[in-house]
Image (cartoon, grey):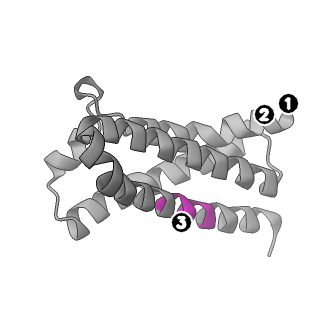
Amino acid sequence: MDRTTLVWVLASCAWLGFAGIAIICGALRVKLLEPRLGEAKAHVIGTVLVCVLIMASIQLFVGASGLTETWPLMRIGAFWTILTICFEFAFGMLVMKQSIETLLADYNIFKGRVWLLVLITTFWGPVLAGMIRAG
């Protein structure tokens, strides 16, 4: 297996880890935070936690991949972001039986919904991690 293929296999495995992080954090948010803090505060705290954990995972990925150049890292971030959006809508509609309107509501920052931060972290995280690593 050549290096490029290996990097993309690692990127795919890393994204599976991101999905696991998001699912576990979501379950913990609903069970532990929402009853104590309410849905709005729990959403913000849960989203920030997901961003922190995904960014830590991205740092590990960038270190393992050895990549520091912006363009390859940006392509990986775009790949992860597309997978995240597709997964979110497929899982939300097929498993959670949520409507498109409900899923899109998480993107409304004017109503305190900050899920967009996860997509920003997923997209720009590799570039930031590469910059830190190249530092």
Q: Nearer the viewer, residue 98 or 90?
A: 98
The residue labelled by disc 3 is 16
Q: On the picture, is 11 further left or further right than 40?
A: right
Whether residue 33 is in magenta: the answer is: no
Q: Is residue 116 above or below residue 87?
A: above
Q: Amino acid at mark 1?
A: Gly
- Image: magenta residue range: 13-19
Q: Is residue 90 above or below residue 107?
A: below
Residue 72 at x, y = what percent? 70, 46
Mainly helix, strand or loop, the magenta region? Answer: helix
Q: Give the quadrant of residue 124.
A: top right
Q: Amino acid at mark 3?
A: Leu
Toward the top, the furthest residue is: 110
Mark 3 crowdedness (10 Å alpha carbons): few <14, some 14-19, many ≥20:
some
- Tell me, yes or no, whether the two marked residues, 1 and 2, touch with CB atoms within 8 Å: yes
The residue labelled by disc 2 is 132
Toward the bottom, the furthest residue is: 1
* Alpha carbon separation for disc pair 1 and 3: 28 Å
- Tell me, yes or no, whether the two marked residues, 1 and 3, touch with CB atoms within 8 Å: no
Residue 105 at x, y = what percent? 21, 40
The residue labelled by disc 1 is 135
Residue 8 at x, y = what percent? 67, 63
- Tell me, yes or no, whether the two marked residues, 2 and 3, touch with CB atoms within 8 Å: no
